[in-house]
């Protein structure tokens, strides 16, 4: 098997960046979900509530994060900042501390995404010195932490599984969907469709080991075009994933596996790298 894609999403629920290489950190791929949009209450905001977030492009330069939208001048945020105000923010049932990127970023996001009537939106970053622990329920005595993903530092998907899903969609008269619908960090190819359901670990030739710990239950974001936020096929591919029962014994629509780093933090991952999977006993 081999890695075919590496993707990061520096700002949670804005557009992602496809890379040829990326550094593995304790929190996943470098800069992944390092920033997040929150409302006036500090609650995370995603494309579920604001589909227009899909229209905000994201670039990482040597010393800054750049957000772009067709209706505004670009917003540049320095990668290194000090003295930012600390806020309490929430992601689902989690609460954690975040750093507020300030008035300029807040006004920019509110202008392009709306929300002024509800107090506006703010951009926050994850403090380097903090830990947001991964739920222990599915770990095997390990510990892991992350920044602003829903719960895990990495999402691994399999190209053959997407191809099988698209076969079913096309057979139903629906359009095939791209892998970008599922916002994975690492895409692999080379095994049977949905073989990843049974994987315990994947080991990359560089010495990186990732533990696959929890199936990824999907929400309505996968029905939305990743470039526009529009939903061209309401309920698809959610409905087909449920029909396929891709995660036997689990109720719902599942695609991809949530993962944690086990070994190799600080190592580079590259598109094209060989990897092997260990099946769960």
Image (cartoon, grey):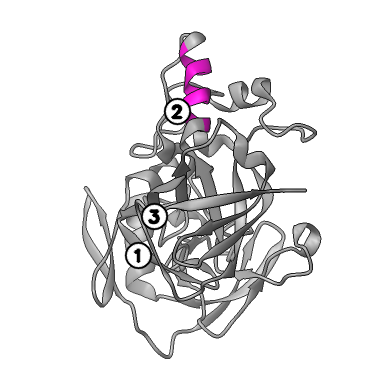
- Hey, which quadrant is residue 206 in on the image? bottom left
In the structure shown, which secondary structural element does the residue marked by tag 2 occupy? loop
Tell me the CA gap for discs 3 and 1.
42 Å
Q: Earlier in the sequence, mark 2 or mark 1?
A: 1
**How far from the left and from the top, in percent, is residue 149?**
56, 59
- Relative to 55, is 256 on the left or the right? right
Classify residue 244 by image quadrant: top right
Residue 243 image offset from top left, x and y in percent: 67, 20
Which residues are drawn in magenta?
161-170
Binning the other alpha carbons within 10 Å of mark 1 as few (below 14), some (14 to 19) or many (20 upward) gives: some
Q: Earlier in the sequence, mark 3 or mark 2?
A: 2
Whether tag 3 and tag 2 are in contact, CB under 8 A, the answer is no
Q: Is residue 215 visible?
A: yes
72 relative to 244 in the view: left or right: left
Residue at image position (73%, 70%) is 142
In terms of secondary structure, where does tag 1 sit? helix
Residue at 35% across / 68% down in the picture? 105
Which residue, given by chain and number where applicable, does mark 2 sit on?
231
Q: Residue furthest bottom?
A: 83
> Which residue in the structure is indicated by mark 1?
107
Q: Tell which of 13 and 251 is nearer to you.
A: 251
Q: Position of residue 226 (x, y in %)?
A: 39, 39
Q: Residue at x 68, y 42 (%)?
A: 198
Secondary structure, magenta segment, majority class: helix
At label 3, counting other C-alpha atoms closer than 10 Å, the crowd grade (few under 14, some 14-19, many 20 or more) is: some
Residue 99's disc number:
none
Question: Which label lies toward us, 2 or 1?
Answer: 2
Which numbered disc covers residue 273?
Answer: 3
CA gap between label 3 and label 2 equals 34 Å
**Residue 168 among those drawn in magenta:** yes
Residue 144 among those drawn in magenta: no
Disc 3 vs disc 1: which is toward the camera? 3
């Amino acid at each position: 098997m081999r890695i075919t894609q590496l993707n990061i999403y520096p700002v949670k629920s804005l557009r992602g960046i496809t890379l040829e290489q990326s550094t593995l950190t304790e929190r996943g791929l470098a800069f992944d979900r390092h920033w997040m949009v929150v409302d006036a209450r500090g609650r995370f905001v995603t494309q579920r509530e604001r589909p227009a977030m899909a229209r905000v492009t994201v670039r990482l330069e040597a010393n800054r994060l750049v957000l772009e939208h067709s209706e505004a001048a670009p917003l540049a945020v320095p990668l290194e900042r000090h003295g930012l105000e600390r806020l309490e923010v929430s992601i689902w049932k989690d609460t954690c501390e975040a750093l507020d990127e300030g008035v300029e970023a807040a006004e920019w996001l509110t202008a392009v995404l709306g929300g002024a009537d509800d107090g506006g939106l703010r951009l926050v970053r994850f403090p380097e010195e903090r830990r947001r622990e991964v739920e222990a329920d599915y770990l095997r005595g390990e510990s892991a932490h992350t920044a602003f993903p829903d719960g895990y530092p990495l999402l691994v998907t399999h190209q053959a599984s997407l191809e099988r899903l698209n076969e079913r969609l096309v057979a139903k008269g629906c359009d095939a969907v791209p892998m970008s619908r599922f916002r994975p960090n690492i895409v692999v190819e080379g095994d049977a469709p949905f073989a990843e359901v049974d994987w315990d670990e994947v080991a990359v030739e560089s010495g990186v080991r990732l533990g696959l710990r929890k199936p990824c239950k999907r929400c309505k974001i996968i029905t939305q075009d990743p470039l526009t936020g529009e939903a061209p096929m309401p309920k698809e591919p959610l409905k087909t994933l449920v029909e396929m029962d891709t995660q036997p014994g689990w109720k719902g629509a599942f695609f991809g596996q949530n993962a944690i780093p086990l070994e190799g933090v600080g190592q580079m991952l590259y598109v094209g790298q060989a990897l092997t999977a260990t099946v769960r006993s």
